[in-house]
Amino acid sequence: MERQEATLIIHSAAELVTCQSLSADGGPRSGQAQGEVGIIEGGAVAVLGERILAVGHTSDITEHYRGEDTDLIDASGKTVTPGLVDAHTHLVWAGWRDEEYAMRLEGATYMDIMQAGGGIMSTVRATRLADEDELKELARGRLLRMLAHGTTTVEIKSGYGLSVEHELKMLRAIRDLNAELREAGTGPRIATTFLGAHAIPEEYSGRADEYVRLVIEEMLPAVAEEGLAEWCDAFCDVGAFDAEQTRRILSAARKLGLGVRLHANEFARVGAAQVAAEMGAVSADHLLVMEPEDIDALKQAGTIAVLLPGTPLGLGLGHYAPARALIEAGVPVALATDCNPGTCPSENLALMVSLACSQMKMTPAEAIVAATINSAHSLNRSHSVGSLEPGKLADIVLWDAPNHRHLAYHFGVNLAEMVFVGGKRVNRRTMTI
Ligand code: NIG
Ligand code: FE
């Protein structure tokens, strides 16, 4: 066999965390396997161009793949993981909501503010005023911050337009940004979700069913026709869309060939977990208020639980999703930031790994699986990202951490020292994607 020379070898890692499946059943990691993170002490990863050639012990990898022109990165004393995958963000928005944050600190709830016309609607007003280019630049800044914190694949939702014109504007901003990033070669990869059913806009106040019709009859067909989204989501909760409306929207989306994911059980139990299961949603996200039958519905349907611990932290709720019960029931768990101006304006997915451990009692290994390969599964990208395996894209992070536990334990600071996207190192100082 011809000897292949790597373009890049990252070697001598204290821990190379592959997130490769040991059980190799090909699906998202659940139950016992949620914690199978695949550590190679003294490990190395060899890269050829934009893809991973091999992973293994440093001596084997250098012997087989090191050539004269191979770039060598010494990861001694550090931890190397796949690039993180953020499976739930609302990254495109204009305007901030820090004044609402201050109101909440004085006792107002998220729902009080929403019912008084603030909340999502205040971001909708600001986002409607921004043009596509402004939105693109705002999102670019946030994506760069994510990349600097080790996130290399990001799901982005629309949902602050809430009219045909403004939802399409948001989605086109995401599409154009994605095209620019792929051209530059070192930007995060983007998956796009249509969230026209994020709130009932004020002009449809008291006419929710008419708005649902607009989503189904005008927005969804336009989104599908332009190929602007892979997924459809809805906010199924009190003060937003009920189970029946959500069912109608998600069925219409499925008929148009979109995958479905759902904001479920964030504030109240209105049957969202059951709708997610029934609609074959790839993920049900948030899950802060759960009863055993909700967990069971997700388990039966094979739905991935995308947990967003930054949201209850940002809202100061004091309760988190029941991660342990979900894992024990065999529901695969993924993690995401929910990055949005209302409940969690954080781009830092590693912080969510830490919160998953301290607040939801996941182990560091389970949380790392959740933020990599399981998130990749939830975005239908497990064939290309989410683990360090031969043939996958070389999206890799070198962390200033002596072992994987430090990613959770040493929290609140950015430990991502080097980030590679498709085998190219991102220069954090000159990031100009
Ligand atoms: O996931 N719950 C609905 N959507 C967001 C919040 C969006 C906002 O407040 O702007 C969430 O928490
Ligand atoms: Fe959300």
Image: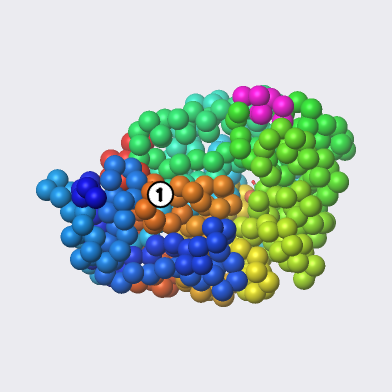
Q: How is the image coloured?
A: rainbow
Predominant secondary structure, magenta span: helix
Residue at figure coordinates x 49%, y 28% from the top left: 176
Q: Position of residue 409 (x, y in %)?
A: 42, 73
Within 10 Å of disc 1 (Cα), the crowding (few <14, some 14-19, many 20+) is many
User: Residue at the location (54% across, 58% down)?
Assistant: 26
Q: Secondary structure at mark 1?
A: loop
Q: Residue at x 72, y 27 (%)?
A: 221
- Residue 103: % across, % down: 66, 55
Q: Is residue 359 above or below residue 231?
A: below
User: On the image, numbered disc 1 is attached to which residue?
Assistant: 392
Q: Quick one: 27 or 166, which is closer to the camera?
A: 27
- Residue 333 percent across, percent down from the top left: 60, 63
Image: 157 above or below 401: above
Q: Is residue 5 left or right of residue 281?
A: left
- Please tell me how many numbered marks the rendered image carries: 1
Visible residue check, residue 370: yes
In which quarter of the view is residue 302 placed?
bottom right
Query: Is 200 or 353 nearer to us in this picture?
Result: 353
Q: Is residue 125 magenta?
A: no
* In this view, 347 is above or below 351: above
Q: Residue furthest left?
A: 68
- Mark 1: amino acid: Lys
Q: Which residues are magenta?
A: 220-226
Q: Is residue 265 visible?
A: no
Q: Quadrant of residue 49?
A: top left
Please indicate whether residue 395 sits to the left or right of residue 255 in the image: left
Picture quadrant of residue 42: bottom left
